Image (cartoon, helix red, strand yellow):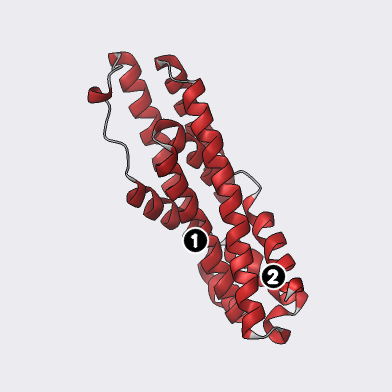
């Protein structure tokens, strides 16, 4: 049981800690909204990681074989979603800056907690790297064959908890960033940097 717990924690942190486009968007979203919204978005990412950990643990090599033919379309879909988010964020930020819309009334309504959760859940589920990562890890350690259902459950819950703790840390950083960059120019720069990073990572995903 302890081995499954440690393995799940290591697996969860291993997939969550590299800060890519999703992590960047999470920080940016929290900086523009509230910690509550960012926390819900973070849990959306962690839920996707947990679901993929569950699928990989239960399905093992079968899942990797099924997903292999559609890795290309999934990668392109993920890249297009990221590019759309990057473009929307940059265009909105530039328009607000040019119009000097400093009041809360003039800004578009931010996503609520439920919408943030579903959005980040969907974005993360589009990334096939997560399920391949968990499938390879499970197959490499023999977890799918040797572990009992209770141990598999502990592994999945530990992976979810590890991912959730890291994503919530990123959301907390976004909240602090939002307090530090409350000015009009600071909001513009944050949006442009976030959009730039997401664009670069989306291009790298398909090149």
Residue named by callout 1: 47
**Within-10-Å neighbours for mark 1: few <14, some 14–19, many 20+:** many
How far is disc 2 from disc 1 in space, using C-alphas? Answer: 19 Å
Image coords of residue 7 (percent x, y): 73, 67
Image coords of residue 121 (percent x, y): 44, 56
Q: Residue at x 65, y 64 (%)?
A: 133
Q: Are marks 2 and 1 in contact (CB under 8 Å)?
A: no
Q: Nearer the viewer, residue 33 or 16?
A: 33
Numbered circle sitting on residue 177: none
User: Would residue 182 be found to the left or right of residue 98 on screen?
Assistant: right
Q: How many marks?
A: 2
Q: Secondary structure at mark 1?
A: helix
Residue 24 in sight from this viewpoint: no
Image coords of residue 18 (percent x, y): 65, 47
Residue named by callout 2: 136
Q: Quadrant of residue 56?
A: bottom right
Residue 108 in sight from this viewpoint: yes
Q: Residue at x 41, y 43 (%)?
A: 36
Q: Nearer the viewer, residue 47 or 203?
A: 47
């Amino acid at each position: 049981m302890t081995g499954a717990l440690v393995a799940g924690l290591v697996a969860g942190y291993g997939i969550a800690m590299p800060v890519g486009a999703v992590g960047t968007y999470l920080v940016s979203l929290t900086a523009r909204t509230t910690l509550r919204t960012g926390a819900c978005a973070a849990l959306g990412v962690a839920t996707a990681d947990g679901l993929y950990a569950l699928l990989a643990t239960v399905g093992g090599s079968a899942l990797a074989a099924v997903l292999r033919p559609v890795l290309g379309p999934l990668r392109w879909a993920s890249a297009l979603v990221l590019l759309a988010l990057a473009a929307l964020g940059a265009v909105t930020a530039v328009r607000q800056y040019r119009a000097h819309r400093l009041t809360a009334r003039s800004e578009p309504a931010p996503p609520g907690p439920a919408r943030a959760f579903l959005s980040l859940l969907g974005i993360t589920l589009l990334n096939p790297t997560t399920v391949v990562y968990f499938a390879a890890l499970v197959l490499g350690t023999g977890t799918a064959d040797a572990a009992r259902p209770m141990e598999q459950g502990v592994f999945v819950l530990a992976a979810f908890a590890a991912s959730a703790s890291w994503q919530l840390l990123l959301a907390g950083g976004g909240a602090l960033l939002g307090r530090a960059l409350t000015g009009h120019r600071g909001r513009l720069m944050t949006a442009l940097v976030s959009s730039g990073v997401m664009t670069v990572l989306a291009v790298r995903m398909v090149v």
